[in-house]
Image (cartoon, rainbow, N blue to C red):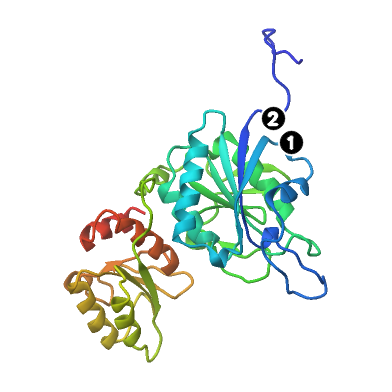
Amino acid sequence: MARSDDGAPVPSGPQRRVHVLGTGGTIAGAQPDPAHYGYTAATYGLDWLLAAVPGLDRLAVLSGEQVVNIGSQDMDDGLWLRLARRVNEVLAAPGIDAALITHGTDTLEETGYFLSLVTAGAKPVVMVGSMRPATAISADGPANIYDGIAVAADPRAAGRGTLVVLNDEIHSARNAVKTGTSNPSAFSSMSRGLLGITSAGRVEWFEHEPPASAGRAPRFDVSDLEALPRVDILHAHAGMSVDLIDAAVAGGARGIVVAGVGAGNMSARAIERLARAAEAGIVVVRSSRVVSAMVLRNSEVDDDRLGFVAAGDLNAPKSRVLLQLALTRTADPQRIQRMFDCS
């Protein structure tokens, strides 16, 4: 065994312990014909995925489990709660230093943001996926797993919240947005930018210490929840039908997120119908359908008078996640606005 300058023994090999939770997705998918883009997601299990990546034992001591094996389009609130409870159990274990989750990219940004709001402590939580299935030519999953383990095992990842590692890039899960459908470079942190980059397991952080803002977002305890409040997303467009608003209300939605045009705007008829919903106690959040947007309070729409909430730079899917969790505490739009403001 190697020894330090003072003669004390220095352990060799990786010392950080990372627990991997598999959920399926394209990263576990099979493409029967490499000449055709069609494939089946969630074909392989976690053991198969990890065995396909050489050198992981040089990065960390790994353990793992298959939580579920689905295409992420089938991820739902119940699975979120199940995953959150398991992740928190893993993070609470004294022998585990970090958690890594393999996940489909279709809803990875939503699951990642949800976990960032419900996981406790400073231990790293890293999410990885892929844009190409496991059997595709130049599959990107193995490299993403390798780099994701490297980030999870890096002590400097602690305190940065849930992270997304794809295509040599490290994103905050709060900021990561899927912007493409096939290119491996399909995620962006929009105007907030990357946290760092990776290359063959080497991790470079753009900020050496976690930013002070990393601890500002509200945290929600979901350990005793069996379900989340229903929140629907409506997409604004020319000629938007108010019937969909009525359907959401009749269906029991406790919140409605509107992916508005521009800076969160919508037709006068839609505003009037949503104002009625707000008066009835349904929380209405204005987001935007624009890829990179900022919806400021009382910008174009009189949120104070109408009782609406402005989403800031959260897109509609992430606004839905935060609103669902906020509604487990309160239906007061002013209190919920404060949660959005510090998210």
Residue 329 lies, in percent from the top left, at 27, 53
Query: Which residue matches tag 2?
Result: 14
The answer to which of 214 and 18 lies nearer the viewer is 18
Residue 153 position by quadrant: top right
Q: Is residue 268 visible?
A: yes
Q: Given the image, on which type of amino acid does mark 1 rest?
A: Asp
Residue drawn at the location 29% of the way across and 78% of the way down: 250
* Left-right relation of 195 to 341: right
Residue drawn at the location 21% of the way across and 60% of the way down: 334
Residue 95 lies, in percent from the top left, at 56, 29
Residue 297 position by quadrant: bottom left
* Pointer 2 or 1: first along the chain: 2
Q: Which mark is residue 57?
A: 1
Height in image: 206 above or below 183? Answer: above
Label 2 environment density (alpha carbons within 10 Å; few <14, some 14–19, many ≥20) = some
Residue 46 lies, in percent from the top left, at 68, 50
Residue 67 lies, in percent from the top left, at 58, 50
Q: CA distance from mark 2 to mark 1?
A: 7 Å
Q: Marks 1 and 2: in contact by CB < 8 Å? A: yes
